[in-house]
Image (cartoon, rainbow, N blue to C red):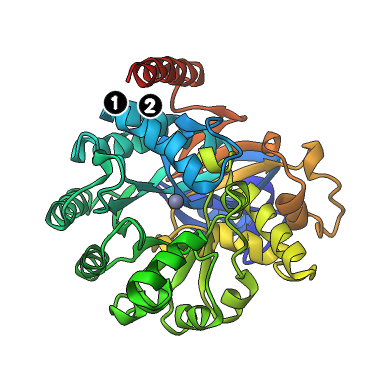
Amino acid sequence: MKLYKPFLLFEEGLFKPDRALVTDGGKIVSVGAYEALVARYPAAEIISWPDEIIVPGTVNAHNHSFQSLLRGLAADRPFLEWRDEALYKYSPYLKAKDVYTGAVFAFSEMMKCGATTVSDYFYVHNEGIESDEAVIQAAKDVGIRFVLARTMYDWTGAPTGYVESIDEAVKNVKYLAEKYENDPMVSIVPAPHSLHAASVEMVKAGHRLAQELDCKFHIHIAEEPFEVDQVLREHHMRPVELLDKIGVMEDGRMTAIHCVWLNDHEKQLMAKNHASLVYCPSSNMFLADGITDIPALMDGGVTIGLGSDGACSNNRISVFEEMRMCAMLQKVNKLDSLAVNYHQAFAMGTKGGAEILQLPIGELKPGFSADFVALNQNDLSMQPISETHEQVLPNIVYSMQPTAIDYVVVNGMCTVDQGNLKTLNEKQIVLNVQNLMNNINNEASKS
Ligand SMILES: [Zn+2]
């Protein structure tokens, strides 16, 4: 049992002094006044953090970990050119062990930036299920809580490693879901890729699986105008209208990624059907996709979480960064400083993502997982903080730099200690990534 005594503790939207948080194993067992908790848990080890502000760990609800390996390649290109020159060019060479190297790299970086959970939308199955297992193992080794959005993909225009038949995809998702059913650190959700990379039958199969496994399914929707045009051409309706018509939205299981190009009717359908959204503002900006209408979706009651998306279309992988980007982009788009405020942006990056991933995380409450981050109040980017503490949350969202992130605790385990990765050797991660990319460059230039 551990009793954490920080400078301030984030509780129900407020930063409170003289509070403590008690953990036992992977769970938070109590939150309350410091003196009272010391009396109640005399055997607990006291961890005194007089300069730290404890907030819930951030939730990265959409990432593609292998894309960290492709960061800096084919930058500044339009989406389809970037896809062909970065993703399609390099990903066919990634074996399961390379996928592991990429995932360790990505998860380590994002955890040091304050993410305690990541949902990895994974589709590079060059070695079938072994490739999925590599990503899961990477998450375990890094110590980050993990949701595998296991992609179902049957558009044959992509590299062959992405593509499976409907039967294969269903069988593989089910196998993994059953295998990790009782693992507190790993969950599996079906993820039919998108309406341009998964057939209508594949999308329906993903939805059926979500019903069977009683979870949500993830799908990219309307990231780019080309998808809207394609769906209009083939089905004479828009993407969300098609998803509504084929019956995959009616039970509130749809988690949409992006939703940049929705019309008003589609936004209404999202709200009416209790769909959720993972918003990736930096990625949408980097790829010049456009701007999702967050205020309208928020007003409709759509649950919104934040995602970094892959690190070669961002190119940072920090949820705190996405909070800032979300609020700023929405303000300038609507010419309204309240379009998204810092409370809303922070909630999206914590409990919004938690709700979407259906995990007891994103808040510091008894019974929730012991997943939290300690931010140093003395970091220059956190100051000033006056006695009222009114600047703390706006500073976290708008000014904080990763230098303020001192400790990361996941499932009760300290994974980042005084800013350093504790679970793996960071120098070795860098070496492994460099060696891998040199090898892949050689292979790619030969063919
Ligand atoms: Zn994505």
Q: Is residue 143 visible?
A: no
On screen, residue 191 versus residue 213, left or right, reads: right
Name the residue nearer the viewer: 78 or 382.
Answer: 78
Q: In the orientation shown, which residue stands out farthest toward the front?
A: 233
The residue that label 1 is drawn on is: 97
Q: Amino acid at mark 1?
A: Lys
Q: Position of residue 135 (x, y in %)?
A: 32, 37
* Residue pictured at 83% horizontal, 44% vertical: 383
* Residue pictured at 34% horizontal, 47% vertical: 185
Check contact, mark 1 vs mark 2: CB within 8 A: yes
* Residue pictured at 81% horizontal, 60% vertical: 390
Q: Quadrant of residue 239?
A: bottom left
The residue that label 2 is drawn on is: 101
Q: Residues within 10 Å of mark 2 (few under 14, many from 20)?
A: many
Spatial CA distance of label 1 from label 2 is 6 Å
Up-down: is 105 above or below 409? above
Q: Position of residue 267 (x, y in %)?
A: 52, 78
Q: Position of residue 168 (x, y in %)?
A: 14, 51
Up-down: is 142 above or below 307? above
Q: Is residue 315 visible?
A: yes
